Image (cartoon, rainbow, N blue to C red):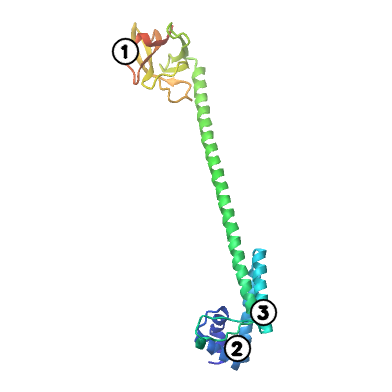
């Protein structure tokens, strides 16, 4: 193989990066001795890699850098003074003397520093990522909360506008129902549209019923009670509760019945009552 083929084969790059096999190393070193241009190509490749390592290096902690550089400097001094002793666990007959370019020892040190700096930077980077993720989730949660509150306020505003429109209707008649003798503080109001026959109930002051009880509205027609539906109190934001429609009524009353309502009113549980005329 001539010099140009050694240079273009990729063997030089494998040799410089430490990936070449022992046979490839021997072959390339013979070529370096034979062809000056091959040796020059190897030196250029080494310089390029050293430059790349230096450019990509990130600062490692000061004490690691100082210890590593001091160890290399002490070893270089020992080699120059002839006092460096290299030990091996291999049998005596298998020992080989390996010559390492001094520049490459410094390049190796730079590579180690680069690795340590990269680990530190990754630790900081991922820490920042987790911090940003936490902030993003907090902001997202706050945004969802604000959106829910905004939807609630919008629903209340629409409900209030609907209630105002009911009050403004000239066909709407308000029937005030004060508390009966057993429940003097109770108060409710029926809004009865005498044109559309719609009935709406406002519970001004009714105590919260037991879990198995429910308020029921009655209309008195020709002296007989007519069921107008039960009061749903689960929606606390609703001001007016739509009840059953009725054409004629002499008075209205509310009793406390078992949950779901009763076919006839429990008279001793009548909380409020009021005449329609």
Q: What element carries label 1?
A: loop
Q: In the shown orientation, is residue 44 left or right of residue 220?
A: right
Q: What separation in Å lies between label 2 and label 3 (alpha carbons)?
A: 28 Å
Q: Quadrant of residue 116?
A: bottom right
Q: Mark 3 points at which residue?
A: 76
Q: Earlier in the sequence, mark 1 or mark 2?
A: 2
> Where residue 128 sits in the image (x, y, percent)?
59, 54
Q: In which quarter of the image is the C terminus?
A: top left
Q: Which disc, if any, is residue 161?
A: none
Mark 2 lies on residue = 38
Q: In this view, does 51 lie to the left or right of 171?
A: right
Q: Is mark 3 on a helix, strand or loop?
A: helix
- Would you say 95 lies left or right of 50 here? left
Camera-side residue of 265 and 163: 265
Residue most extreme to the bottom? 34
Total count of labels: 3
Q: Please identify, in this view, whether the residue under mark 1 or under mark 3 is nearer the observer.
A: 3
Instruction: Return the residue at label 1.
Output: 264
């Amino acid at each position: 193989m001539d010099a140009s083929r050694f240079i273009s084969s990729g063997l030089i790059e494998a040799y410089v990066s430490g990936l070449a096999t022992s046979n490839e190393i021997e072959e390339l070193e013979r070529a370096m001795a034979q062809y000056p241009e091959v040796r020059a190509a190897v030196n250029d490749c080494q310089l390029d890699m050293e430059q790349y390592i230096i450019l990509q290096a990130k600062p490692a902690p000061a004490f690691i850098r100082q210890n590593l550089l001091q160890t290399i400097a002490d070893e270089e001094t020992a080699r120059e003074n002839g006092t460096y002793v290299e030990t091996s666990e291999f049998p005596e007959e298998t020992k080989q003397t390996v010559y390492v370019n001094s520049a490459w020892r410094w390049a190796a040190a730079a590579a180690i520093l680069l690795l340590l700096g990269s680990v530190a930077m990754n630790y900081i980077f991922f820490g920042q990522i987790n911090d940003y993720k936490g902030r993003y989730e907090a902001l997202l949660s706050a945004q969802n909360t604000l959106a829910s509150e905004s939807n609630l306020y919008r629903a209340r505003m629409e409900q209030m506008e609907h209630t105002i429109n009911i009050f403004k209707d000239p066909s709407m008649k308000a029937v005030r129902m004060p508390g009966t003798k057993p429940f003097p503080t109770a108060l409710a109001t029926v809004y009865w549209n005498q044109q559309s026959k719609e009935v709406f109930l406002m519970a001004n002051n009714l105590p919260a019923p037991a879990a198995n009880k429910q308020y029921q509205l009655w209309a008195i027609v020709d002296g007989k009670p007519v069921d107008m539906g039960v009061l749903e109190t689960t929606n606390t934001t609703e001001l007016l509760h739509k009840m059953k429609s009725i054409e004629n009524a002499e008075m209205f009353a509310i009793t406390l019945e078992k949950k779901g309502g009763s076919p006839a009113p429990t008279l001793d549980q009548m909380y409020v009552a009021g005449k329609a005329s």
